[in-house]
Image (cartoon, rainbow, N blue to C red):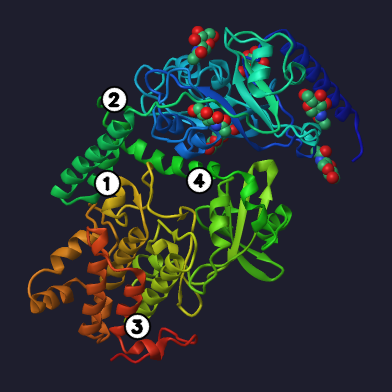
Amino acid sequence: MKLKPHHFHFLFTNLLLLLYQIHHSQAQPSTYGYVCSPNTNTSGYPCQTYVFYRATSPDFLDLASIGDLFSVSRLSIAKPSNISNPSFSLLPGQGIFAPISCGCNPVQNKTLNFLSFANLTYTFKKDDTFYYVSTHHFGNLTTYQAVEVVNPTLVPEDLQIGSDAYFPIFCKCPNITQLQNSVNFLVSYVFQPGDSLDSVASKFGVTKQAIVDVNRANIGPFDTVFVPVAKLPHLNQPPGVAPVVGVVEKKENKGAVVGLGVGLGICVLLLVLVCGFWVYREAWFRRSMEEEGLKEQKLEKGGRKYMKEMEQNLLLADVSDTLDKYRVFEIDELRKATDGFHERCVVQGSVYKGFIEGKVYAIKKMKWNAYEELKILQKVNHGNLVRLEGFCIDPEDASCYLVYEYIENGSLYSWLHEHNRGNLKWKTRLRIAIDVANGLQYIHEHTTPQVVHKDVKSTNILLDSNMRGKIANFGLAKSGCNAITMHIVGTQGYIAPEYLADGVVSPKMDVFAFGVVLLELISGREAIDEEGRVLWMSARDVWEGTEEEKTRKLMRWVDESLLNESCSAESLMNMMGVAIACTNKDPSKRPSMVDVVYALCKGDDFFYEISSNDFSTSSLKAR
Ligand SMILES: *[C@@H]1O[C@H](CO)[C@@H](O)[C@H](O)[C@H]1NC(C)=O
Ligand SMILES: *[C@@H]1O[C@H](CO)[C@@H](O)[C@H](O)[C@H]1NC(C)=O
Ligand SMILES: *[C@@H]1O[C@H](CO)[C@@H](O)[C@H](O)[C@H]1NC(C)=O
Ligand SMILES: *[C@@H]1O[C@H](CO)[C@@H](O)[C@H](O)[C@H]1NC(C)=O
Ligand SMILES: *[C@@H]1O[C@H](CO)[C@@H](O)[C@H](O)[C@H]1NC(C)=O
Ligand SMILES: *[C@@H]1O[C@H](CO)[C@@H](O)[C@H](O)[C@H]1NC(C)=O
């Protein structure tokens, strides 16, 4: 690059700015945050790091609410904090380590340019202000001035209940020099009135000088300091703070049951979802009712938070052994393949179609939450699961890209409910059902620990050039079973009642969702209709009465396009029977995927005929 005079000018003013900032920050606390250099060659951004957080009365005395505040799971706090039971309540002021993703983010203020922080989202409640949330909820890990800088569009005097703001939690990532000196984390710590540099140093097992080197010279109370450590110190947690455990669990269950009861009463799953979630959030915050409008926002937030939780559950180290199994793509390669991630190349959401060396790929852009999916996909390899080909990490943008085989014919959803509507023959539908059942059977039975997909639905079932079904999108998948999760996530119309009520994660929730997909295949109807009625509930009405009544009602209920092709009632009834069994409200009464595969194949003697790979939609004669 040739340097022109205006470059010098630019450099010079930047230098002045830098000097100003250094001088400035020496003189007074960094009320606006900490400037950083986005140069990835030297800076080490972004990174996973920790904040030292003190439990705060009355709202943040348990890991669930603190986890919500930081958008991480209870477990990801309990582990580094030496808390044996994540359900235990904490004492006011008790210290814990909460994981955060620290980035060097551009801000609109030209003076500051880039600030180093973890970008957390906070939803306002009654009486919240930037100041109150920064100093109280977040314990001075950020300042209201910094919040104003990153939320230029919000008017601090006019915050709406239920609206979101970004809270920049102060953090720093170690630079190259520090990493070489085995400083792996710069832990954010809020200096307390009773603290001295010596006491903080001994708490973290480092020297006083090490802290001074990284921070300003004059540290006052409630300033954030960054403590350089190779690994987190062990915290000595006060023992036996368990009393709330039973109460909390009971409350949640009771709340959920009430929510479920109300919802089922009026037979609207949507309502169950909203109520259940709301009642359960209610117990969580132990708060009285808030504005009606808040419910839905919270619901949406649950999903988003869950993704973030995934992201932070895993630290980078966990996947290093995965990485060499896959092709590592360069970010420039992906940019070229997708015309710089042009809208035109979008397949769906954040999935792009791209050509690399003459081959088509589906490229999914993710924030750093790709690890869980990577970890799961490396364990699974089956013809009915979409294959991962490689990945790419773009540290500048804190993004990760997963590169999959491209599946030509799009989603089952589009074939059932959108532009290709009515174009699926019964045999094809049956084949797709068996394909998906095989894929699910594989992930349930042949992986250790067992993987649960958690988001089986027709949009996540893709059809290849031979109209064979493949399961995609392991973004929510969870390995390890019978876990209880606090964040309900999934898609309305497919969520199993027990998951909604108690957050129980088990393969049976995939069985349930698969049953709903079968109902879609049979009826051509969507899992949830415009009025919010769920398909699996209406299917129950169809499946009542004597065999004859069932057949009669079923024939009125099936996809009209199937009636034109004389498909056998017997085959339809068989699939319907499987679907009804799968969507049983009691998970223990649902069949396993092994049984499902067997039942689907058994009921149709075409199975063997159509199991060859060159199966196509048109070449089959109807029975
Ligand atoms: C980072 O390093 C690469 C070579 O390692 C160099 O080409 C690039 O210009 C550097 N980037 C910056 C911003 O210094
Ligand atoms: C930018 O930040 C500086 C503090 O570093 C502050 O004084 C100034 O008002 C801010 N400018 C804008 C436009 O927010
Ligand atoms: C945060 O700092 C303010 C003073 O700036 C102080 O009054 C408040 O108690 C601090 N909050 C916590 C939780 O320590
Ligand atoms: C914080 O994250 C959100 C998306 O999660 C993004 O839209 C916003 O620009 C980010 N804010 C900053 C200051 O980086
Ligand atoms: C890394 O940070 C330390 C402490 O802030 C500083 O002394 C050092 O110069 C930095 N190194 C680089 C390569 O920026
Ligand atoms: C965890 O805390 C307990 C006290 O509750 C303490 O005895 C134990 O040594 C701590 N564990 C570690 C690894 O520091």
Of 154 and 602, nearer the camera is 602
Percent across and percent down for residue 62 are 40, 28
Within 10 Å of the Cα at label 3, are there few (<14), some (14-19), or many (20+) other Cα atoms?
many
Disc on res. 287: 2
Q: Quadrant of residue 262?
A: top left
Residue at image x 44%, y 26%?
A: 239
Percent across and percent down for residue 259 are 21, 41
Within 10 Å of the Cα at label 2, are there few (<14), some (14-19), or many (20+) other Cα atoms?
few
Disc number lying in front (3 or 1):
1
Circle 3 is placed at which residue position? Answer: 427
Of 103 and 70, nearer the camera is 70
Circle 1 is placed at which residue position? Answer: 501
Disc number lying in front (3 or 4):
4
Residue at image x 46%, y 35%?
A: 84
| Residue 460 visible in this rendered orientation of the protein | yes
Mark 3 and mark 4: Cα distance apart in space: 38 Å
**Is the distance from the Cβ of mark 2 to the nearest ligand 3 atom less than 8 Å?**
no
Disc on res. 310: 4
Percent across and percent down for residue 112 are 68, 22
Mark 4 and mark 2: Cα distance apart in space: 27 Å
353 left or right of 323?
A: left
Within 10 Å of the Cα at label 1, are there few (<14), some (14-19), or many (20+) other Cα atoms?
many
Q: Earlier in the sequence, mark 3 or mark 1?
A: 3
Q: Earlier in the sequence, mark 3 or mark 4?
A: 4
Mark 4 and mark 1: Cα distance apart in space: 21 Å
Give the amino acid at mark 2.
Answer: Arg
